[in-house]
Image (spheres, rainbow, N blue to C red):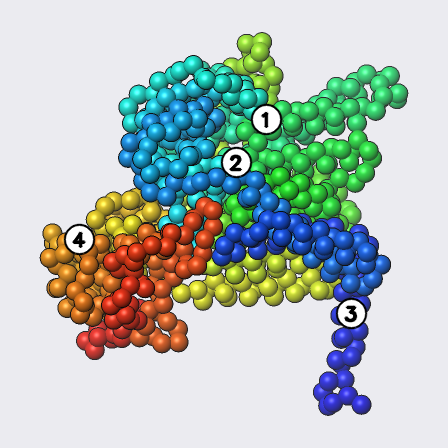
């Protein structure tokens, strides 16, 4: 007999068991394999220190063998996904071991370098290039493999050239705030050990050895991209030229900041990054055009597989576009997805499925496992995942319920196509929303509107004209096609600027942690991949993720990794800045993470901040002071008035304030102080590089004599006591 009120429980258990077995049935596990593989990669990046690669590989091998041996058991699904997780972890660990290289730890103010130019980037104000170093002369610098250098606009050397130069080098940029994007990790997996800028002239020299086939290929590809850019530049100028070049070659850094911001605010930023949409248009135009031409010959339609020939030609065009555009991760994913679809057409198989997307994801992650943590990969796959779900699940359900006569009338007037475009824009926008909010701290409320207005023009005019321009360029008849592109791009920019100017167009979101992002990702995957009512558990995950984001506390104090900038949240709830050196990029990132629309030069950022030659002070919401001390002479006064001091000097032994020294910041990176939820009197510190964390792209400082200001140094216990954040009696009503 069941307890009172629980008679329904056995039936629910049976139903849940049936649904679970159905989800683990034949053909259902393949789409989950890249999910588990990616989870293993994410675990690698969450580790405190570098895993032992051979142990990770051995673990993956054992898990794979166990899954094969027990493939007929009910535990097979769990074993297979565990093996995929272990394989993902081992793949990225092995790649990190294979590409291991030293990273610059301290600035080098005058280094002499020789090497080959591998990459050149054109930007709005400056140019940038990657140098493969063959010789480095500098004190305190380890042997570096690659460095990325900035130069004056128009002075970057050609790809493939061998150059000699002097440069000022900096260690790779660490996260600008705790939980912020790790630029150093990105550079590490690109083999780049330092960044900086060139001092003086760049001299071209005769190389001491051959640069290798990769360099020759890069030089040839860059030469082709430069030739296309030159032809476009002869017909177009300004942002139109920059966008046309971005669409065809992937060189998008020359677009002006206002237009670039308008594109992303309006939800059209995806057009500037070559991804699935562009690859689909290129392959689709070639496929349908060639198929239509071949169909004009009656004899071929009967005896020749024109559909398969057109698919093969489209695959070749997509491969050329991949090489031309620079083969970034998003473009690789797009090419692989397109290739699987076209190959499916050639072998008479269904093309657009979750299996297709799963295979593309596995191949990309096997080649570049580090791409998992990059926003381009996340947003690209999320959008494609949503569109595949729409094709496989949503469209059949929608059209099955539609009245046939009404649907026919709507289709006659193009209503179905418009509805599908709107629905596709909505689904792709919703799927990418968590990742845009996490990485860029904004969402695009009017993305559907801008895509409805602009994308038909881009698809029907801009991209086909660009492809025809490429085809006509060797014959000298390309100029008319660039003019056609100009018309479409002008319309796209106009739509972007109009939508970006609408009220509420910038949906700002405060920064939140990876936990909420992972929960939202799991929710999206459950909704898309599950076929039983269990899929609605994903909706619960999304709701929980939204609540998690809303409850994420924002920092009361932000301190830069060099101690030169300190932002304090005042009584108005906004950040106020003290600084001894300007860094507009860092401040822009801080403001974006705080959902603050102000610009780095806004006067209100300095409101309430008092400065003199000894330093600056700014009040917290409760009226207590935070000090940025610039000279030792002012430390006595700061210790008497402030609860928190940021300084490079040694404070007095009896200083009652908490002191954060620049030595500590160099070791732990940027610091964020938040009020403790358990004890509102106290602040909880979060650092960009927590104690004990030691990764190749952010190595821990070697042990040695204790430095002044080190948390473990003798006599610092009083200074490191938790900050008393109790509001002053006269200011209790001002606390935000």
Q: Earlier in the sequence, mark 4 or mark 1?
A: 1
Q: Earlier in the sequence, mark 4 or mark 3?
A: 3
Q: To which residue does mark 4 refer?
A: 630
Residue 438, given in percent of the width and then of the height, sits at 48, 53
Q: Do we see residue 383 in this rendering?
A: no
Question: Quick one: quadrant of the N terminus?
Answer: bottom right
Disc 2 or disc 3, which is closer to the eye?
A: 3
**Mark 1 lies on residue:** 323
> How far apart are the two marked residues, 1 and 2, measured between alpha carbons?
15 Å
Q: Residues within 10 Å of mark 1 (few under 14, many from 20)?
A: some
Q: Which residue is mark 2?
A: 273
> Quadrant location of residue 17?
bottom right
Q: Which comes before the other along the chain, label 2 or label 3? A: 3
Q: Nearer the viewer, mark 1 or mark 2?
A: 1
Question: Marks 2 and 1: in contact by CB < 8 Å?
Answer: no
Which label's residue is closer to the chain start, 4 or 2?
A: 2
Is residue 72 visible in this depiction of the protein?
A: yes
Q: If the image is split into quadrants, where does the C terminus sit?
A: bottom left
């Amino acid at each position: 007999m069941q307890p009172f009120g629980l008679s329904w429980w056995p039936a629910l258990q049976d139903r849940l068991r049936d649904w679970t077995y159905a989800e683990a049935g034949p053909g259902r596990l393949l789409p989950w394999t890249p999910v588990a593989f990616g989870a293993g990669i994410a675990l690698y990046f969450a580790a405190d220190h570098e895993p032992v690669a051979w142990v990770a590989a051995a673990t993956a091998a054992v898990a794979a063998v166990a899954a094969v041996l027990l493939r007929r058991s009910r535990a097979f699904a769990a074993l297979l996904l565990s093996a995929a997780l272990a394989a993902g972890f081992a793949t990225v660990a092995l790649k990190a071991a294979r590409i291991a290289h030293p990273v610059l730890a301290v600035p080098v103010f005058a280094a002499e370098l020789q090497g080959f130019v591998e990459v050149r980037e054109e930007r709005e104000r400056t140019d940038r290039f990657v140098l493969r170093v063959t010789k480095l002369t500098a004190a305190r610098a380890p042997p570096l493999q690659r460095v990325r250098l900035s130069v004056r606009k128009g002075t970057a050397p050609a790809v493939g050239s061998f150059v000699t130069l002097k440069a000022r080098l900096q260690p790779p940029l660490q996260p600008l705030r705790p939980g912020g994007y790790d630029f150093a990790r990105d550079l590490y997996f690109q083999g780049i050990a330092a960044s900086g800028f060139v001092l003086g002239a760049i001299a071209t020299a005769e190389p001491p050895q051959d640069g290798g086939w990769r360099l020759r290929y890069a030089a040839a590809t860059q030469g082709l991209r430069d030739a296309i850019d030159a032809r476009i530049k002869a017909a177009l100028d300004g942002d139109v030229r920059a966008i046309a070049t971005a669409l065809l070659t992937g060189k998008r850094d020359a677009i002006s900041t206002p237009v670039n911001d308008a594109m992303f605010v309006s939800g059209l930023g995806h057009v500037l990054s070559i991804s699935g949409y562009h690859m689909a248009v290129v392959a689709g135009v070639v496929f349908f055009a060639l198929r239509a031409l071949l169909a004009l010959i009656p004899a071929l339609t009967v005896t020749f597989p024109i559909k398969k020939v057109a698919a093969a030609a489209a695959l070749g065009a997509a491969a050329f576009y991949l090489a031309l555009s620079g083969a970034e991760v998003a473009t690789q994913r797009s090419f692989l997805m397109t290739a699987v679809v076209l190959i499916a057409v050639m072998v008479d198989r269904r093309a657009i499925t979750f299996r297709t997307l799963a295979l593309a994801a596995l191949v990309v992650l096997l080649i570049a496992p580090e791409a998992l943590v990059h926003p381009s990969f996340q947003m690209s796959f999320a959008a494609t995942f949503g569109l595949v779900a729409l094709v496989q699940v949503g469209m059949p359900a929608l059209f099955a319920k539609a009245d046939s006569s009404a649907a026919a009338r709507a289709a006659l007037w193009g209503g179905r196509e418009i509805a599908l475009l709107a629905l596709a824009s909505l689904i792709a926008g919703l799927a990418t929303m968590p990742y845009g909010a996490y990485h860029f701290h904004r969402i695009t409320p009017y993305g559907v509107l801008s895509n409805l207005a602009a994308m038909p023009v881009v698809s029907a005019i801009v991209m086909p004209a660009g492809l025809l321009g490429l085809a006509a360029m060797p014959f000298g008849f390309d100029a008319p096609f660039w003019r056609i592109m100009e018309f479409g791009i002008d319309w796209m920019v106009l739509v972007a600027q109009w939508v970006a100017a609408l009220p509420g167009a910038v949906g700002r979101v405060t920064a939140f942690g990876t936990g909420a992002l992972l929960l939202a990702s799991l929710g999206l995957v459950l909704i898309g991949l599950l076929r039983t009512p269990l899929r609605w558990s994903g909706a619960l995950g999304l709701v929980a993720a939204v609540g998690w984001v809303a409850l994420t506390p924002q920092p009361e104090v932000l301190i830069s990794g060099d101690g030169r900038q300190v932002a304090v949240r005042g009584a108005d709830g906004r950040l106020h800045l003290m600084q001894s050196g300007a860094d507009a990029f860092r401040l822009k990132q801080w403001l974006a993470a705080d959902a603050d629309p102000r610009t780095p030069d806004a006067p209100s950022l300095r409101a309430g901040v008092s400065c003199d030659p000894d330093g600056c002070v700014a009040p917290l919401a409760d009226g207590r002071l935070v000090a940025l001390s610039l000279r030792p002479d002012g430390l006595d006064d700061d210790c008497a008035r402030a609860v928190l001091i940021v300084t490079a000097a040694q404070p007095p032994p009896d200083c009652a304030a908490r002191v954060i020294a620049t030595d500590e910041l160099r070791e732990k990176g940027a610091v964020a102080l938040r009020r403790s939820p358990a004890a509102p009197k106290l602040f909880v510190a979060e650092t960009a590089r927590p104690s004990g964390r030691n990764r190749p792209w952010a190595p821990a400082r070697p042990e040695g004599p204790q430095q002044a200001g080190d948390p473990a140094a003798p006599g610092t216990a009083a200074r490191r006591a938790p900050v008393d954040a109790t509001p002053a009696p006269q200011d209790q009503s001002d606390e935000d």
